[in-house]
Image (cartoon, rainbow, N blue to C red):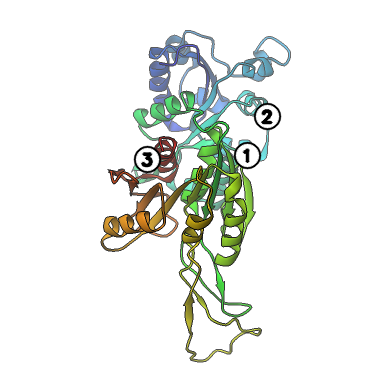
Amino acid sequence: MLKGKNILLGVTGSIAAFKALEIVRELKRLDANLTVCMTQSATKLITPLSFESLSGAEVITDLFILGKPLSHIKLTENLDLLAIVPATANILGKLAAGVADDALSTIFLATHAPVLVAPAMNEKMWEHRVVQRNVETLKALGCRVIDPVVGELACRSAGRGRLPDKETIMNEIIHMLTLKKDFKGKRLLVTASRTEEPLDPIRYVSNRASGKLGFAIAARANVRGAQVTLISGPSSLSPPPGVKLLHVKTSDEMRKEVLRLINKHDYLIMTAAISDFRPDTVKRDKIKAREITLRLIRTTDILKEVKERKPRSLRVIGFSLEARKGVERAREKLREKGLDMIVICGESVPGADEASVKVLSKSGKLHRLPRLHKDAIADELLDFIASL
């Protein structure tokens, strides 16, 4: 399956380093061309000879014994994937800061190949805000990060920090190396996050949508070859690399941008949780802290306007969140708003990384996806969208 693919596997000084041996065995079984690079800390836990025996090639342990000037550049010239399994908090910090003080961190800076990072460490280290900041930085740079899972750790405690199983890591490696470019030449307009409807200069009416799924769809569509414009309401998420990002706040601002751009795109994917209501008046000064009565009025239904104005070639994908009768309501929305597909989202914890969704096509066929990470959901949804 991976014949002809050039992979460099980076192994760092996590106690989970021994699990990388199974990754090497699987990659060789699939006929990949494999080079292993170990940090000095990793060599204290497991010998390079173990990796050499399985990979059939010399293991890189030091930048200065590679034999040739600029050999780290040579290593990356035809590289298809750099996978760092396991990745310590130390290497995450180096990569995020651009530090190049050993062979692996230097190779990272020299490559333009896709990068997969699978962290493994103590739960307290993984949850530290510095480590999380570094992870978010790597994601913003375009790296694929597989979060650690909950399980027994080296210190005999249990928590999130354990390296995912071999199957999970191999599935991601195979996915990254065989990724389709099925959206090449296509233009996608994606909306994400929430809108905020002002009540006064300080307060607003809104909801808890994080925008994670919309940002994930934009990022994965870009990787699959699409030219992507992302219209986002307020969000703390980093802009996906290669994606044009437009910021809006209110539902009216979102409406204006969508209607302005639909004629320039092939697909409209409306993941944004647009406020259904807004205050009928906006006070010029902050409302005094006292009991008040608010009068709310409906915001404009953007998808209904899109239906009236869209070009025939535009494919429109809507999203629906319903506490009850979700499929029934989604069928009504699909018909009323002239959608080509609608995604039914189940209720979940605001800002969660995982979700479960159903996909309803124009033909009436319903597909149920299992609970998945939103990055994985994004790819699944793009598969459906590509088939429209």
Q: Is residue 344 visible?
A: yes
Q: Nearer the viewer, mark 3 or mark 1?
A: 1
Could you say where residue 254 lies in the image, as x and y percent from the top left? Answer: 57, 61
Q: Quadrant of the C terminus?
A: top left
Q: What residue is at 56 percent from the left and 52 percent from the top? A: 237
Circle 1 packing at 10 Å, graded few (<14), some (14-19), many (20+), is some
* Residue 153 tag number: 3
Q: CA distance from mark 3 to mark 2?
A: 29 Å
Residue type indicated by callout 2: Asp
* Residue 101 tag number: 2
Residue placed most toward the observer, 20 or 240: 240
Residue type indicated by callout 1: Gly
* Residue 242 tag number: 1
Circle 2 packing at 10 Å, graded few (<14), some (14-19), many (20+), is few
* Residue 166 tag number: none
Could you say where residue 97 lies in the image, as x and y percent from the top left? Answer: 66, 40
The numbered mark, 2 or 1, whose residue comes first in the sequence reads 2
